[in-house]
């Protein structure tokens, strides 16, 4: 009998590819999304779609839950109202999810819940593992509270993993979506000094890591879901220019970014030299450990899935 999985955020940049990979592995999927059912099925494939988690109250239960719900952190300038939207779409949804799961006849074996390397705040050039102490800033508090919202299930005996995901590359979205056009026009360049690290990772490796965490009974706690080869913004800029065969002569000065983006400019001007220490130590294999092949696949015509 196929195992049944509940997924939140299943229509997103990572989620829809995850759904199709799980279906290929013969899992049965239910996807929570506020989109119409037909749109969910068009994006995700042969899944059951629900628009309200309360529909699953007192449910018999699922074997696993993967929680990826959350508004895009870089989609809009960080007003106080936007910050609250970011919190509600992550923490609020996770709190509701945990409450609903606790009403099930049978608890899931595992919850894999979203987080981000923003958990650590700005770390400069320090190598960041899962044990690194965070700096207290907005992204840390957001991720900390997001993770804490899921932890009550661990107290119930559910195996809980947190995917502290980096900056995701892949076709038709992710961090490259806004960079591609200026670079193609020959107007690309580093952001600020370019010395800040971008903890990049290819979407296929995020999907692979999420499934690995779900299927691996010994996996628990936080995992840095990032490439084993972190790169600075200047290195990402050079590599993207190289795969696009374009110059990268137009840097964006930090003061300009701060005026244009406000506090959100910190996302671009600071970073983490994060490494996937736990994934590597526990034997996870990356499909795209190196930057240039990952970028080349992400921009290749017809590469979307």
Image (cartoon, grey):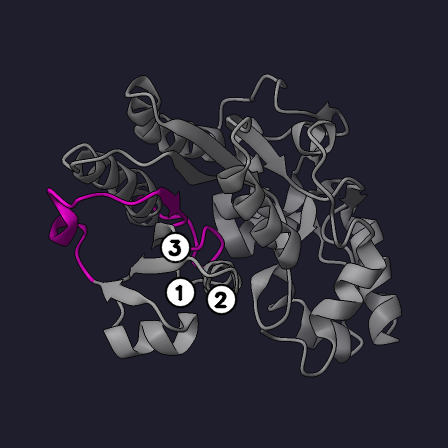
Residue topped by disc 3:
2
Q: Earlier in the sequence, mark 1 or mark 3?
A: 3
Residue carrying label 2: 20
79 part of magenta stretch: yes
Q: Which mark is residue 207?
A: none
Identity of the residue drawn at 42% across and 29% down: 160
Q: Is residue 214 left or right of residue 297?
A: left
Instruction: Give the mark nearer the N terminus: 2 vs 1.
Output: 1
The residue identified by callout 1 is 11
Side (left or right) of 301 relative to 292:
left
- The main secondary structure of the magenta stretch is loop
Q: At 61% across and 50% down in the image, what residue appears?
A: 208
The CA span between labels 2 and 3 is 15 Å
Measure how far apart labels 1 and 3 are at the Cα level.
22 Å
**Span shown in magenta:** 51-80
Q: For this rendering, which residue is in front, 3 or 96?
A: 3
Measured from the top left, where is residue 225 in percent x and y?
Answer: 62, 40
- Residue, x 35% and y 22% (percent of image)? 154
């Amino acid at each position: 009998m196929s195992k049944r999985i509940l997924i939140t955020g299943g229509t997103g940049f990572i989620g829809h590819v995850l759904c199709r990979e799980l279906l290929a592995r013969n899992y049965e999927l239910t996807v929570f999304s506020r989109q119409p059912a037909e749109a969910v099925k068009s994006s995700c494939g042969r899944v059951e779609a629900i628009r309200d988690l309360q529909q699953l109250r007192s449910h018999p239960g699922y074997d696993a839950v993967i929680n990826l719900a959350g508004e895009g952190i870089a989609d809009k300038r960080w007003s106080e109202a936007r910050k609250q939207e970011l919190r509600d779409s992550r923490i609020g949804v996770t709190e509701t999810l945990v409450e609903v799961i606790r009403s099930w006849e049978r608890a899931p074996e595992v919850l894999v819940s979203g987080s981000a390397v923003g958990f650590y705040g700005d770390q400069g050039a320090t190598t960041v593992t899962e044990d690194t102490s965070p700096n207290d800033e907005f992204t840390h508090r957001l991720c900390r509270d997001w993770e804490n919202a899921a932890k009550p299930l661990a107290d119930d005996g559910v195996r809980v993993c947190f995917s502290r995901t980096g900056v995701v590359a892949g076709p038709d979205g992710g961090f490259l979506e806004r960079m591609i056009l200026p670079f193609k026009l020959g107007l690309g360049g580093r952001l600020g000094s370019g010395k800040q690290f971008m903890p990049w990772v290819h979407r296929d490796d995020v999907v692979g890591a999420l499934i690995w965490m779900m299927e691996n009974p010994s996996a628990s706690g936080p995992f840095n879901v990032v490439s084993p080869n972190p790169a600075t913004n200047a290195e990402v800029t050079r590599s993207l220019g190289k795969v696009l065969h374009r110059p990268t002569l137009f840097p964006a000065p930090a003061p300009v970014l701060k005026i244009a983006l406000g506090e959100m400019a910190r996302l671009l001007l600071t970073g983490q030299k994060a490494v996937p220490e736990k994934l590597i130590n526990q034997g996870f294999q990356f499909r795209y450990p190196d930057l240039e092949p990952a970028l080349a696949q992400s921009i290749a015509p017809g590469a979307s899935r």
